Amino acid sequence: MTQPFYDFCVAAGEPSVRDATGGGQHWVGCTLHTCRLDADGSAIRVVSTTRLPATAPGYLTVARTRSGQQMLYAISGEEISWYSIGDDGKVELCGSTPTGSDGAAHLCTDHSTRLLFTANYGSGTVSLLPIAEDGALGEAKVYAHGPGAHDGAKGSWGDGPQFRQESAHPHGVVVCGGQLYVADLGSNQVVCWTIDFDHCTLRAASAITLHDLAGPRHIQFTTSGDIGYALNELDNTICVLRRDSAEGGELSLVQTLSSLPQGWAEAHADPAMFPNEVYSKPSHASELLLSPDNRFVYASNRGHDSIAVFAINASDGKLTPLQFEPTRGRIPWVFCLSEDGRFVVVQNNHTRASEAGPDSLVVFRRDEPTGLLNVSAARLEFPTISSVWALPISRP
């Protein structure tokens, strides 16, 4: 049945100070907006707002608590907050707690909403926080990753990809079966931890090292858990990985392919044309998601400014490129799919390309049989956007 509307949560505000990378923002007037998309995708508008403290959330996720409440979790540097989602889509702050570490970049929960995990890029760690039945978070336990792939490299932003890998930099987390998988850009690995749910602890299990200067940023698995897809930020590639659940979740490489059109990177190799002064290549990959039916993979390219669409081969999980759809804006950072997969909403960050804003929110219709994207007329602009995520279709 077609939904009457779709709600998305957008974190937006006015930047007062920001570092060269666009991360480490300091904000004034930051707000969580509930934005409502018409069922046909023709228009989107703000329907409610919730004022926030000065630090803007960098990533959001939604989970249903064990008591049945839909909860929005948001990470902001060293802190994570949780918000109830009302029948009208309005979000209300319920609480916040430290992640126990610095520079959290991503978060996820397990499927039973017993534990929440964060990837802490800045400190080279992952955090585990127990979740109460009502969705409140307990005290964090922190686990360190090892040295970077180019341990001890000296330099500063813009000196090249090796410097991004001078130490461990966990960037994405996802739970599959009884394991937590961490995409670690700095160590150039996807690291597997075994989860002990009874004692709320992690135990190091295995890791797969990807090709040099890949820089894993995010990883997602098919519903069966047999195949995973790792998006590599530094060289705009995707690695298809087979997961062996009988061997403690160990991963093996199946395929590596570019998330960019053939020849584009070579034709745009002049550093003067890179998106900003800290980019070491003409484009860097950002977000990766799977369609709800496990038939398509979507990846965003910052620099090429596109969403790449890939078809999944049902027999072996390999990918075939189908489309490189322009995002109608600069530096697509986070994007999300509506819960039923009918729409894709993209966050463009002109301000992170050292350009004057505003940042934009652009909506695409997703053709379910083919996986292809078509831009709609729905669009919103804000001075700066830090994140976007789909709210659940059915709320209590």
Image (tube, rainbow, N blue to C red):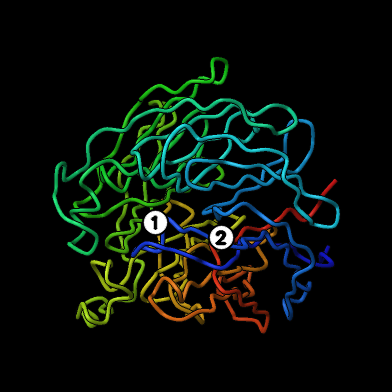
Q: Is residue 366 left or right of residue 264?
A: right
Which residue appears at 56% of the width and 69% of the height? Answer: 346
Q: Amino acid at mark 1?
A: Lys
Q: Give me the residue at 35% from left, 39% from top.
A: 123
Residue projecting furthest to the top:
199
Residue 278 image position (x, y, % from top left): 27, 66
| Secondary structure found at label 1 | loop
User: Callout 2: 10 Å neighbours few (<14), some, many (20+)?
Assistant: many
Where residue 112 sits, quadrant-wise, is top right
196 w.r.t. 43: above or below = above
Residue assigned mark 1: 318
- State the residue position of label 2: 387
Depth check, mark 1 against mark 2: the one in front is 2
Residue found 29% across the figure and 42% down from its top: 189
Which mark, residue 5? none
Number of on-image labels: 2
Residue 352 image position (x, y, % from top left): 41, 70
Q: Residues within 10 Å of mark 1 (few under 14, many from 20)?
A: some
Query: Which of the two discs, 1 and 2, labels the residue nearer the N terminus?
Result: 1
Question: For the N terminus, which image quadrant?
Answer: bottom right
* Real-space Cα separation, disc 1 to disc 2, in angstroms: 30 Å
In which quadrant of the rendered image does the C terminus lie? top right
Q: Amino acid at mark 2?
A: Ser
Residue situated in front as seen by the camera: 66 or 29: 29
Q: Residue 389: give x, y in percent of width and height.
A: 62, 58
Q: Are marks 1 and 2 in contact (CB under 8 Å)?
A: no
Task: Examine the rendered structure and indicate whether residue 152 appears above or below residue 234.
Answer: above
- Residue 177: x %, y % from top left: 52, 32
- Secondary element under disc 2, as helix, strand or loop, is strand
Tell me: residue 188, above or below residue 266: above
